[in-house]
Amino acid sequence: MNKKYIFVVGGVISGVGKGITASSIAFILKNRGLKVTAIKIDPYINVDAGTMNPTEHGEVFVLNDGDETDQDMGNYERFLDIDLTRISYMTTGRVYQTVIDKERNLEYKGKNVEVVPDIPLEVIRRIKTVQQDSSAEVVIIEIGGTVGEYQNMLFLEAARMMKLESPRDVSFVMVSYLPTPAKIGEMKTKPTQFAVRTLNASGIQPDVLITRGSTALDNKRKEKLSLLCNLLPDRIISASDVDSIYDIPINFEKEKLSDKFCELLGMTCKLPDRQAWNKWKKFASHAHNGKDVVKIAMIGKYFETGDFILSDSYLSVIEALKFSSYAQNRKPMFSWLSSENFEKHPEKIKELRKYDGVVVPGGFGKRGVEGNLQVVEFARKNKIPYLGLCYGMQMMVIEYARNVLGLKGANTREVNPRAKDIVIDVMESQKENLINKRYGGSMRLGAYPAKLKEGTIARASYGKKEISERHRHRYEVNPAYIKDLEKNGLVFSGYSPSGELMEIAELPKSQHPFFLGTQFHPEFLARPMSPHPLFTAFIQACIGNKKK
């Protein structure tokens, strides 16, 4: 069988659900016995996602090999239960950089290098490299942005060229939005008609149309779209809003979407794997049928965008908490609390008592630091289960140094380089990067091993002595303070094989039901069928706190 390629593009609005659609298509085809992988194309000039603002772009998802990528790479890994590598992530900046470097190295042998066809050809080369390296039978390629934008035209051109080269091996999916204006009360197809025609102008006709909307698509509008968008009615798939993204593959298969792709691309597909399918349906059902709720306070500074909340800044943390909650037959209920708000209104810190657990996720910079420290102190003193991730662990160490060791000026160099007691300092390997202003792709990134101390929460949670977790940071616990912190009760239960870097800090269960922070990002390894052990231990502590 020739290798097959499915391109997923978006119409009408951004955030229409291309990533989840691509992930769901990948999942249902994998369940038909096909080897599937996925690629994300971002139309930004940025070389990677590492320097982008989370409130504009969502979280930065880090791969095992250290690549800083778009959050949809996390969706692909979770839905397919695979580890992807940097070749599966592509940006305009990355593509242009490669073409320019090749031109400088005379790899084009002196010929005139042009935007077309050389940029699309580099895109095609990268797509085919992913296929070869993964030995995938089907490659799902999500093209970021919205059809009609200037930024993604060259990627659409690459897709068109691939279709021209091998018509039977390339298929196109458009995910488009059908609004139902409140004052009109009728679902409108015209924006999607324009989106399809705009895609046609790039030389591409979608084979499948996924119609997003607040309600299901009715037959009358399906017939209209079929006529005006040049599609068979059974290839127009209704995708109304759902409470859980994990219902989407189930809904797709109700409309026999995997059958349509097997037919479109001439693939020999096995019958669905019933055992795997039933496991997924059972997992997805927990989003609706949890025995009870677990109330979790998410303390952050990257979710306020104007008058709106953008939880995508902490997407992997949210999903990891869901997986562990579902495994305990519970539903998580999240509240978004700004750390800056506690600085302005210290009296509001008492509101944390109504939550079963508190999470302080990763972050950078000075904003909201003192509010975070108030949260940590309150959670520690009031025995509220606390999970600190990366920056959240650093806040935990600073708070402990200030209020237990009595080092009132304790701080991180990132916030106050003149502090008397810098308990969180720049890693030795990072000092030169900061001096020379090398920021992009230069942090401690990707998977690193760690050893776990016997008799600790971390060791009991993982059930093994050594682990590997993904990192994204420049700062670490200052070695000069480790002995004093340990002498005063803080336990460093995870550390690098050399013993130099502290990876997990915690308090013993005899002192606190769950007070633990990680320098790494465990959320990146949480999967639907294999929840992360630290998140599970945290949720169990939250359930215990709720009962208490």
Image (cartoon, rainbow, N blue to C red):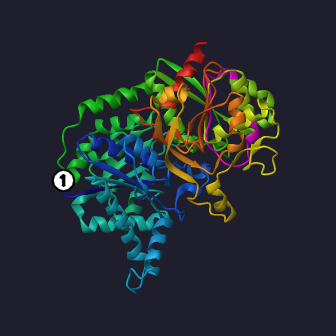
| The C terminus lies in quadrant | top right
Read off the residue under disc 1. Answer: 266
Judge from the rendering whether residue 91 lies leftward or rightward of residue 206; answer left or right.
right
Of 19 and 257, nearer the camera is 19
Is residue 478 visible in this depiction of the protein? Answer: no
| The N terminus lies in quadrant | bottom left
- Identify whether 90 is placed above or below 77: below
352 within the magenta span: no
- What's the residue at 28%, 64% (across, down)? 163
Give the magenta range: 353-371
Q: Quadrant of residue 159?
A: bottom left
Q: Quadrant of residue 423?
A: top right
Of 416 and 214, nearer the camera is 416
- What's the residue at 35%, 38% (across, down)? 249
Q: Amino acid at mark 1?
A: Gly
Q: Identify the element where label 1 is drawn.
A: loop
Residue 191: x and y in percent read 45, 53
Judge from the rendering whether residue 526 lies leftward or rightward of residue 183; answer left or right.
left
- Identify whether 51 is placed above or below 342: below
Of 429 and 316, nearer the camera is 429
Packing grade of label 1 (10 A; few <14, some 14-19, many >=20) is some
